[in-house]
Amino acid sequence: MIKHESIETNSGLLIILTLIVISIGGLVEIVPLFYINDTVEDVAGVRPYTPLELRGRDIYQREGCYLCHSQMIRPFRDELLRYGHYSLAAESRYDHPFQWGSKRTGPDLARVGGKFSNEWHVAHLKNPRDVVPESIMPNYPWLLENDLDYADVQARMRALKRTGVPYSETQQEYDRNIAEFGLVVADRLDILNAEDSLVEQAMGQNYDGVLSRITEMDALVAYLQVLGTMVDFSQYDEGYFVEFR
Ligand code: HEC
């Protein structure tokens, strides 16, 4: 007690000791960032979002879905039973910003891809109570009315490229993506080809059930349907996770 009082009444000493404490805290937070590339292991299957999925992700953020939904399955038994394999760092390596979150008014969405049909998602987003009567999730009917604006999708991809997402613009980058992700995926990660690839995916899969236009619903459902599906977990963790399935 007495010693602490002498610190608090001596501003010079207080400043010096405060700086020491802050420096230690700073080092603990900053130093690991220099090793981030070693920390995030490569996991087969994880790829950047296609232009359509990327626009869907933008809409997810615009509508504030993250305010009620997390996207990180914690490594606990109850989470595992409910959602599946816990989230890997690599699964959000191309997410800028990540959507982990901690607020779960609704369920975690990290592995929602493939859990429901496209039709279910469209009906649910239009009016959640049509498919889940007790739901308190808001309606998002405008997603089906609004045409998807994708005029700036190339600029968005370029911005992400600067943060390290391997979208390609040069032949060399494109070739590297073919080697890493295969030809079909590499085509979709090519910035110069982005608008065509977006139209092709939206029209080919018809996520929203509307054939004549590309709506915001197309993009959002494409995004939801890819969440958590990139890694093939049947290859790993034989035994431990199989036991719970
Ligand atoms: C006010 C909180 C809230 C907001 C905002 C919200 N949701 Fe939900 N969401 C819920 C609740 C509660 C449920 C569980 C009941 C249900 O299925 O409707 C849910 C369920 C879901 C499900 C089904 C998940 C599952 O595994 O059963 C999906 C998919 C979903 N929401 C997507 C979205 C998307 C996309 C948005 C943004 C456009 C969004 N939600 C915004 C609360 C919310």
Image (cartoon, rainbow, N blue to C red):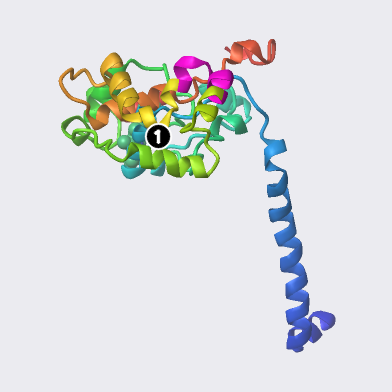
In-image side of 155 versus 92 (left or right): left
Q: Residue furthest front?
A: 171
Asked whether residue 195 appears in the rendered view, the answer is: yes
Q: Does 5 appear in magenta? A: no
What is the x, y in percent for residue 124? 27, 25
Q: Residue furthest right?
A: 3
Q: How many numbered markers are drawn?
A: 1
Secondary structure of the residue carrying tag 1 is: loop
Q: Which residues are magenta?
A: 176-186
Instruction: Give 32 or 188, whichever is nearer the viewer.
Output: 188
Q: Quadrant of residue 8?
A: bottom right
What is the x, y in percent for residue 12? 76, 86
Question: Which residue matches tag 1?
Answer: 106
Q: Does 184 appear in magenta? A: yes
Instruction: Give 219 or 167, whichever is nearer the viewer.
Output: 167
Picture residue at 30% right of the left edge, 15% below the top: 205
Picture residue at 46% right of the left edge, 31% below the top: 108
Assign the C terminus to one quadrant of the image.
top right
What is the x, y in percent for residue 64? 35, 44
Assign the N terminus to one quadrant of the image.
bottom right
Q: Quadrant of residue 189?
A: top left
Ligand 1, seen in the image, is in the quarter at top left
Asked whether residue 128 appears in the rendered view, the answer is: no
In-image side of 84 versus 197 (left or right): right
What is the x, y in percent for residue 139? 23, 35
* 109 to 119, vertically: above or below: below
Disc 1 Cβ-to-ligand 1 distance below 8 Å:
yes
* 142 to 163, vertically: above or below: above
Q: Quadrant of residue 117?
A: top left
Name the amino acid type tagged 1.
Gly
Instruction: Give 184 or 27, whichever is nearer the viewer.
Output: 184
Picture residue at 49% right of the left edge, 32% below the top: 170
